[in-house]
Amino acid sequence: MSTSGDCGLSAGLAILGVVQAGNRQLLGDAVLGMAVSAVVAVAVTMDLGGTRGPDLVAYVFAAGLGALMLVRRRFPVLALAATAVGLIAYHAAGYPPIGLALPVAAGLYSAAEAGSLVVAATVAVALVLVSTTFRLMEGEDPEYLLGFELSSTIGLMVAAIALGAAVRATRLLRAEQRRTIARAAAEREHEARRRVEEERLRIARDLHDVLGHTIAVISVQADVAREALDNDQAGARSALTIIRRAGDDAIRELRGTLGLLRDADQGDGRAPTASLRHLDALVAATTGSGLAVQLSTEGEPVALPVVVDATACRIVQESLTNCLRHARATKAEVRLRYERDRLGITVADDGRGADLPHEPVGRGLTGMRERAALLGGHLAVSSRPGAGFLVEASLPLEAPR
């Protein structure tokens, strides 16, 4: 069976269900209409008063009141109005009294269910007043009419209106609940997509930082090894050792990142591998690549949240990578400043600098700003041609909730 065939079968079953539900409603309305016509016809036949005896027109009124039950769902206000007009015309013609409650109850219910509560109440009051007036004028017993029948008629009318209003309120409540559930599901889906996107961006930044720094170190040391291969074998070996170490570090961090991806569904809580604890090794590798790096710390170091620690390390790593690849610098200074509630990071070099407003900013700088902003911190890069680059970042010591 093809997928299109399955869809067609499902659609056919749904249509069949709707048709069957509609048929059940139509059958119920037909039964109700016949019951109304039969009760009114019996009341007409009993001839309990009035100035005019039963005739064919009176039974036509009975049939018409029953027939209105067939259209009360589609046209509730119109059916109620037609019922009211028919009853008034019937009493005005002087036919025997038939009561109000049963002929008009279904119309009142349908109008209230459709939301026309004021219309239903107005019609009910008007019918009670008109019918009572006509019957008193025709000489009916006031004690029976006002003391017994009127109270039961009003009670049934109020019950019909209240039931219709309650059904409408229940239907609206269920519809609102369905909308709330749908909105909640959409919000959960949106939140899931947002988190996936954030995780994708975080992993992309990590890979960019790791590979960018490693490739920069390898590129510089490969040039050193090539130049020293013939005349300075010790220097060539040193350069190759640094290349090997940089490659091992990159593999270690890539394995950590891939491990996070593999275990994302298990939620084992493993943290990113980048940390300020590795800063000495990063500085050593960068210094071995020909860029003299001076590391200094101000204030009393404190334990940092994992995400703040990793972000701080990535900012320093990306800054030193830019020094190696783009700045043509010979030395750089990295300064960490532990304040009461923030960690300050400054990376400065003596390279060629740039005219930042007129030169494009790479993805590395954009990624550093995004990392800092996600934590509630900020990052600024300043430079002047011939004056080197200055990267200044400030991160909160507490990770955001």
Image: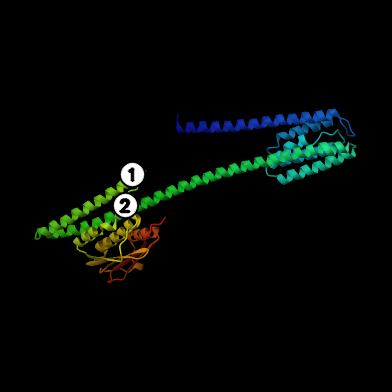
Q: Are marks 1 and 2 in contact (CB under 8 Å)?
A: no
Marking on residue 272 = 2
Classify residue 234 by image quadrant: bottom left
Q: Nearer the viewer, residue 139 or 4?
A: 139
- Label 1, on which residue? 263
Q: Secondary structure at mark 1?
A: loop
The image position of residue 215, as x and y in percent, is 24, 56
Could you give the CA–CA distance between mark 1 and mark 2, rounded to whole angstroms? Answer: 13 Å
The image position of residue 349, as x and y in percent, is 26, 67
Q: Amino acid at mark 2?
A: Pro
Q: Nearer the viewer, residue 258 or 400?
A: 400
- 294 over 37 or under it: above or below: below
Quarter of the rendering occupied by the N terminus:
top left
- What residue appears at the point 65 percent right and 42 percent down from the top-left corner? 168
Count of numbered circles on the image: 2
Classify residue 75 by image quadrant: top right
